[in-house]
Amino acid sequence: MAASPDPKALTIPTRRYVAGEPMVWLTAMGLTLSLTLVFFLLCVVVWNGLGVFWPSRVVEFSVDQGGKREVFLGIEIKRQLKRAPGKAGVNEIQIFTGNKENYNGQAFQYFDVSSITTRTPEGVMLVERMERGHAIGQPVELRIKGEAPLKADDAKFDSRLAQLISEVGHRREEIKSFEKGVIGRGAQEMKELEDEKRAMAATKRLDPARIKQIDEKIAELNKDFTDNLDPKRKALRAQQDDHQLVLKIASGEEKVISLGVVIDTVYPNKLSVIGQFGRFLRNAFLFVWEDPREANTEGGIFPAIVGTFVMTILMSVAVVPFGVLAAIYLREYAKQGLFVRIVRISVNNLAGVPSIVFGVFGLGFFVYIVGGSIDSFFYPGRPDPVFGTGAVLWASLTLALMTVPVVIVATEESIASVPRGMREGSLACGASKWQTIQRIVLPASIPGILTGLILAMARGAGEVAPLMLVGVVKLAPALPVGGDFPFLHLDYKFMHLGFHIYDVGFQSPDSEAAKPMVFATTLVLILLVLALNLSAIMIRERLRRKYATGAF
Amino acid sequence: MPAMTANDIKTSAPSVVSHAAGSGAPGVPDYISCRNYSFYYGPNKVLHEISLDIPERQVTAFIGPSGCGKSTLLRNFNRMNDLIDGVHHDGDIIVSGRTIYDPHLEVTSLRKRIGMVFQKSNPFPKSIYENIVYGLRVAGVNDKRVLDQCVEEALRGAALWDEAKDRLSASALGLSGGQQQRLCIARAIAVQPEILLMDEPCSALDPIATSKVEELILELKKSFTVVIVTHNMQQAARVSDRTALFYLGRLVEYDTTLKIFTNPSQKQTEDYITGRFG
């Protein structure tokens, strides 16, 4: 072995290789790629989502249709290459014309770019309506009940129109609150009386005096409805059609719109940049605050925002205690061994189970078994299920079950990272193990628990598939919070932003009209998750400062 | 089980036999006595048949090279090693007449009687006030007047009152290292234990903070039985009345500090004291 060493064995690799530089590049590339993709996704969502609210100019397109000229008023949506066979290389333009009822129910038209000439007319009016989407045209006159028609060139036209629209808007609110409030309460009372009767029948405890009383009360309510409430409602509704707005659409045809359906009017081509910006803010604001209309393709998404928020909060309320207790037992009390290791592996794997499986489980267990039992126990004789059907409570619990592994893992790690010295200090003061956990270990692990919660919320808030089985609907009649006592209605079905995206984008009759809504809703969902996470992060940072253990 | 007070133990205690090394100081009853005590981490025997008696209201120092078992023995006095999996022991430790391994004895009540100060100061991330009353709170004391009085006494006892009285509600983590260690001493004496175990309490402190803690130890021995583990021979000489030298899990020599440092009976002790090994 004393022979001189083989010179080849001593060949030193290049410095660059030793320093691992190629690996550094590779890791940097990995990060860059994922960042780029995320950034690109965000850009697409933000650009398209915000673009929905920008009030574009209305342009007059005159189209050469084989020698015949046709005129359309509309907003340019995009230009693209035609996909039709044999037409490769032809550019087409998509325009939004509104006035669905005049164009066979289509709000969008496609033309070859080469066939059109454009001009921007000054006084075009864009009318936002409750039904059938937007109307676009030159205003002609305002037909006011009991007055001579007010021509569009009259100086008072705009102010009078605005005044009437706000009057109609107030009345619309009045009708809504009258129908939901007074009439709704009567209907609710009637339903409760009927339920009581049915419950008596189901439990075979008939009380003739009470039944008579109920029947009388129902008859009284019915009479009140037919004699007072219904006529009042009809009168209010009829008043909505008192005035009409006449528009001349691009083809020259005159179009009469009842002011009852008009939400707002604007002259998009007269707006200054500041005016456009104001309009942009207004549109965004209404999108967030309004109820949806027209099969969710118009109006706002307020119920979906509230639904997502309420469900996520309920989920957090359910998942944190559940996960933290499980983690404490696993880490502090369970005898560490093969069994605990198996449990831990299973918990981790639970996080990888497809979410639809949790949905099926939620439907089978929470909805049918738990909800069904609650119904048969507390609401006997009801024809419609109360808890035995999808509800915000079951959706939250299903998602809580789905996200509990995340909380368990995060909590376990943060419990394990509480310095040993701190526990020993507590035990040395005569504290029991549970007192140590409760007073020292848990407060110090709150930041870690919140990290788990943040991850759980991020996953839960964006989940759609399981929700479809356990309580999400396309259009909920009422919000799960607010309204009547008890103000949090756990048995209500709810709308959800994630499901709204799916529904509007892929289940809607007018997919072109829905496209912008998809982007805008996505943007709101991302912002909502961000807001929930940021608040959790802020709480976490505050607690971290409080429990900063610099002395260890 | 019925709560056991210090008085009960003292009156019911049989006169502790000084069968081993013996305290040698007449009139001072032995307080902690180890009887042929061995301790194992799993299969490893880390303490070999230790027998020693620690007298009341004196400072006893445990010295010896790292890994000699002195900290392990100290941590067994209040059964802190119970937290570790797979430990067991032979022999017995008797504290004021009663074995600490009595199945009827609650470990928490034992630890209330035997306070402990650790090598690294370990204040809780709470206010100074809450740190000190922690032991009382876990014992169920919530009377504000009792707590206030206890905080003042404990802080005065730990020579921290003047520095901390104006910032009782401030976080304990804002104190300096030396102050934190004295806070931990205050926290330990706040529950009024009989015995105070100190596991290298000055090893992370600068000389000034160390001298303050040492002064404090001399003050504390008036009311507590103090057992201190230290690597610092001078410290043992300065503060302790009796010194025990451990080596490889065995008790080499145990006697008055004066004797250990001036006239040890074992060659090994002399070598260690003079720095020839260890």
Image (cartoon, coloured by chain):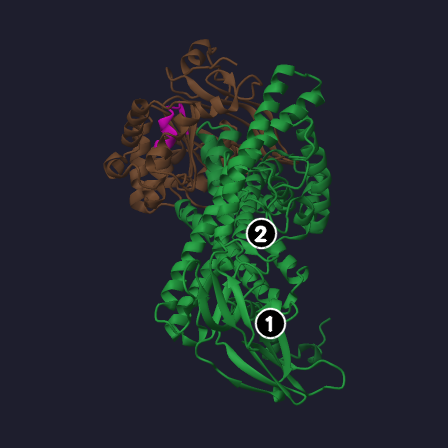
Q: Residues within 10 Å of mark 1 (few under 14, many from 20)?
A: few
Amino acid at pointer 1: Leu
Rendered location of residue A174, percent (x, y): 45, 47
Chain A rendering hue: green
Label 2: which secondary element: helix
N-terminal-most mark, 2 or 1 = 1
Above or below, A54 against A340 in this view is: below
Magenta residues, start to end: B186-196
Please say whether residue B82 is one of the residues in the magenta stretch: no
Report the disc number at residue A33. 1
Amino acid at pointer 2: Ala
Label 1: which secondary element: helix
Chain letter, brown in picture: B
To the question of a shared chain for discs 2 and 1, the answer is yes
Rendered location of residue B97, percent (x, y): 48, 15
Task: Check the residue under mark 2 and report the chain it is in.
Answer: A
Q: Nearer the viewer, residue A454 or B32?
A: A454
Image point 38% across, 63% down: which residue? A160
Above or below, A189 against A230 in this view is: above
Image point 40% across, 13% down: which residue? B7
Tell me how far mark 2 sits from mark 1, CA to CA.
26 Å
Q: Which corner quadrant of the image does residue A397 belong to?
A: top right
Q: Which residue is mark 2?
A: A461
Task: Check the residue under mark 1 and report the chain it is in.
Answer: A
